[in-house]
Amino acid sequence: MENIYLTIVLAPLFGAIVAGLFGRQIGRAGAHWITILGVGLSCVLSLNVLWQFITGEAEVYNQTVYTWLASGSFNFEVGFMVDTLTAVMMSVVTFVSLMVHIYTIGYMHDDPGYQRFFSYIALFTFSMLMLVMANNFVQLFFGWEAVGLVSYLLIGFWFKKETAIFANMKAFLVNRVGDLGFLLGIGCVLYFFGSLDYATVFAAAPSHANDTMTLFAGHEWSAMTVICILLFIGAMGKSAQAPLHVWLPDSMEGPTPISALIHAATMVTAGIFMVARMSPLFELSETALSFVLVIGATTALFTGLIGIVQNDIKRVVAYSTLSQLGYMTVALGASAYSAAIFHLMTHAFFKALLFLGAGSVIIAMHHKQDMREMGGLKKYMPITFITAWIGTVALVGVPFTSGFFSKDAIIEAVHHASRAGSGYAYACVLIGVLITALYSFRLLYLTFHGKERMDEHTRSHLHESPWVVTVPLVLLAIPSLFIGYFTVEPILFGGFFDGAIVVNAAHDPLLALGEDFHGPAAFALHGFTQWPFFLLLTGFGLATWIYMFRPDIADTIKARFKPIWTILDKKYGFDEFNQAVFGRGTVFLGRFLSKHGDQQIIDGLVVNGSARAVGWFSSVLRHVQSGYLYHYAFATILGLIALVTAFVLMGREGL
Amino acid sequence: MDYPLLSLLIFAPIVGGIVVLAAGESRPGLARWLALLVSLITMALCIPLLQNFDSSTAQMQFVERVMWIETFDIHYFLGVDGIAVPLIVLTAFTSVLVVVAGWEVIQTRVSQYFAAFLILEGLMIGVFAALDAILFYVFFEAMLLPMFLIIGMWGGPNRVYATLKFFLYTFFGSVFLLIGLIYLYLEGGSFSILDMHRLPLPLDAQIWLFFAFLIGFAVKVPMFPVHTWLPDAHVEAPTGGSVVLAAIMLKIGGYGFLRFSLPIVPDGSQAMDWVVILLSLIAIVYIGLVALAQADMKKLIAYSSISHMGFVTLGAFMVFQVLENGTMEAAQLGLEGAMVQMISHGFISGAMFLCVGVLYDRMHSRMIGDYGGVANTMPWFAAFAVLFSMANAGLPGTSGFVGEFMVIVASLQANFWFAFTAALTLIIGAAYTLWMVKRVIFGDVTNTNVARLKDINAREAVILSSLAIAVLALGVYPDPLIDLMHASVAHLLEQIQLGKL
């Protein structure tokens, strides 16, 4: 098996290296072929691995490839752990990546950085696979930062654009804030467990449940709470949870295929995956899980609200991604890890679909992204239009679509949870359904329906995108609709993740939920009678009324609720605050320290000051050498008197 | 071993340097090729060094010992262990790159330039190989001269101030070191460093010696607050000078702590460890913030060096508190992290200064504001620069991560807040490095000078690729390096734990 897993990981890396270093030699077609073949091979092998897990042929694999660093009893290794959780992640990552590779042929067709782009996305696939297949924390951290690097490179892919290179730096730095917590969390794991190997740590976890550590003198903290919160801070960075969410909307400066791949379907879900992987640790800390729950719920609701007022088509989808990541986090906080991974999977399909659909629209619109200049596109691009509708019904959670199964499971799980903060979380995710429907249908109506608001030149060139674009859309639309129906039972209630995810049965919300589960059809039919569906209908109705029938009313509402609209438009002021305090504040502090600390105090006062002091001292001393004999004679007599006095006084004492 | 390998390593470049000097100014081409040959021979001598080095023991190896000055019992005494060997290899490796880097840009007094670097190389290897304190001190001081000349003769407009500051600062430090060494000789009757390791000393004497060593080595590292000579020296130094300064000379301070302070005055170090820990943490955070404010690329990298060297001193001196609150393995991990950080920083800082050199050779400016959009005209250069910047920001998979990771996780065993403060470098280091990348490499072409830039040539590509390979290899597979030093570090840890009281 090791060879297969190595191939899965290394095939994209090989493609990335060839396309990156020899891009000029192999040409554009060579670059996309080599990377597509690499990722395609990974995808086929990953799906095969998943299939073997489904049929029960495969066993959990946990082996070391090589020892990265060994020092005493510390053994940091590079190795793979492949279980059901990993297999699902591998399949999702490679499948979406493959779709995005194909799509990119169309989207980046005229870009001079074609080869470089393929190299980056293949490198991303490698990094992401290293992350999900790791069997230890060091490799996890490697993958974690490597996907961050590729994300940095891809957001700033069009490096001439000032906004893009600002956004990529912002993304990297905000992620580094999370990584600070993550690395300290890893350090704490090493401190308490003496190992960074998953299997060792997870096996020993229960016996450390009551360990404590002192952070501030006099206050004992549960070690597991500290570890889990620190690790989760890492997840907050990567999975863009408030208040570290600020980088994700800006990441839309990058080309659309990577928004779909990295900033919607895969990389941003790394945090969710990580927490699910660490479930044996998180289960030991109620406090940490409550923290996760509240952060997730806050993100789910409040970032969704921002989505309503955005006009850039990609930004709407980006805020939707933030909100859905919040849903996944809520599920983690409610101990419904399987539901989180389930939603991660369905979301990967329909959100990648929506992003790629938005990208298709952007191609048609000649790289304009403002929805106010769109409208009526349905007749020009029918495939994009239909697939975008499919993505939307899945996103809002219309019963029987895959989004319904995963999202409803989360809402129900939170409903059953009794953890501190679960009431708040339940309210947030419920209202979130209404919000999701509002911004999603608003996007559809503004883009595909209504009056054609673009200029004449653009309108005359409107046409459906080429097949390399539409085929991935169709291939993603299929799982967006159906995959939930077929997988909900094994994933949520059939124990597919048993062994990979550990849940304390005493507070497993899915266990309670499973008692009422009588097959996916019954579950979906039941969904028609539940609150989320009514909220969805309300959102749909509102959006339809406003954007289909009374376009004028949107402005009236905007004017009426001006303060709220302003707050949302300003995104609660996070960007301004961070810019002022952390951005300019830190640079100001650096300048202040440089000028006053280094230049004035150390160099000015101490270094050059001591040089001046020596100069001053010698200039004073110079006067002693006056050249007059009587000065010297006088000094000699004074000295003699002083010595004699000292001798007499000391001598007497000595006697 | 039937030939004196260490002497060869020391004197091959020194004698070679004299030969290059003798080649004279009239034949610069010959001087260049001779210098390259000498540096390659020295590098080749590292192969038997690595091959025959037994990493399973902490014993000094390749020992040579002959009487030098009988009156004071001073020996020509050489030997290396797992702490010295990596640093010697780093020195030989860097010297080759420096010779190649100076190939075209140095057009005045060519033979003198290369001779100075070769002699400097020999002296630096001597520092790492010396086991007699006076021999060490001689190399330690002699090393200043070629560097003084390199900055003074091929340096920038403000070189006189920089060289004087550099010389006085380091000289000031080394006087204290000499006093300490003489005191140890008077107490123990031997200048052998190994004898000094064994010499019992009362605590108060150890504390005095600790401070003497601290001043001597802290200036070299350099540690806050005796660091201000470094940015000035870097700014004025020619590229090669900056590379040697950052990649090797700073390491001599770290090496001194490991070779002198910790084993000779373990109890003094324990009593005063908080001083070094505090100064290291200040270096990491304060200096990182100061780096953020720099407008001159070389100054920025110089400050970044000081900040990164903070991990070396932190890793070395937190060991007492790690032993107290954590495990012995963690203490070892921290010490090894300090060593790895030294080697890694040698690669990365060398690479960063070479990158600035590549730009400086073309535009004759080090100011960030004069650049912008370099990636448009120099795509290959941009790729290297981004790679090294990421390494500088401690990205896993590059060598920059390994040492920092080891020190951070080990320091957590001493005190959570040590680790927290040190880990702030994750943010600060990324901030100053990537902000520079953003302003220099990315963006649209800002002016006609940038528009006219030519991408790196084959010679520059060779230099940068070899460093890139080194940075990646050490990042992906650091185990062989750890293996090399493990026994010696374990022995050092034993000496520390045993104490002398």
Image: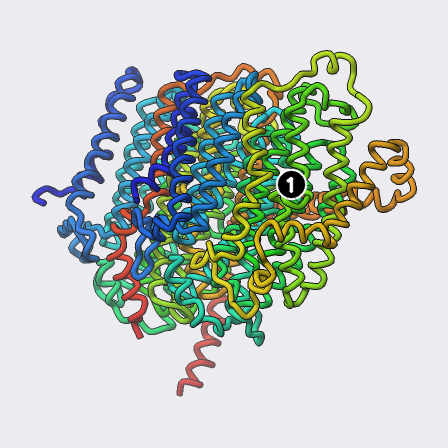
Looking at the figure, which quarter contains the C terminus of chain A? bottom left
Image point (62%, 36%), residue name = A251
Image point (49%, 51%), residue name = B226
Name the foreground residue: B195 vs A517: A517
Q: Where is residue A289 in the image (x, y as percent from the top left)?
A: 59, 63
Determine whether B218 is above or below B298 in the image.
below
Q: Which residue lies furthest to the left in this view?
A: B2
Specify the quadrant of the image occupied by residue A208: bottom left
Q: Can residue B242 be seen in this view?
A: no
Colour scheme in use: rainbow
Q: Is residue A87 visible?
A: yes
Determine whether B491 is above or below B388 in the image.
below
Q: In this view, does A118 lie to the left or right of A67?
A: right
Q: Where is residue A449 in the image (x, y as percent from the top left)?
A: 77, 27
Name the foreground residue: B17 vs B474: B474
Task: Name the amino acid type tagged 1.
Answer: Ala
Q: Residues within 10 Å of mark 1 (few under 14, many from 20)?
A: many
Determine whether B70 is above or below A504 in the image.
above
Name the foreground residue: A416 vs B269: A416
Chain letter belonging to callout 1: A
Image point (66%, 42%), residue name = A395
How many badges with numbers are in the image? 1
Q: Where is residue B183 in the image (x, y as percent from the top left)?
A: 31, 63
Image point (39%, 16%), residue name = A25
**Element at label 1:** helix
Specify the quadrant of the image occupied by residue B29: top left
- The residue beneath circle 1 is A394
Looking at the figure, which quarter contains the N terminus of chain A? top left
Name the foreground residue: B257 vs A147: A147
Q: Where is residue B281 in the image (x, y as percent from the top left)?
A: 51, 56
Q: Is residue B166 left or right of residue A426?
A: left
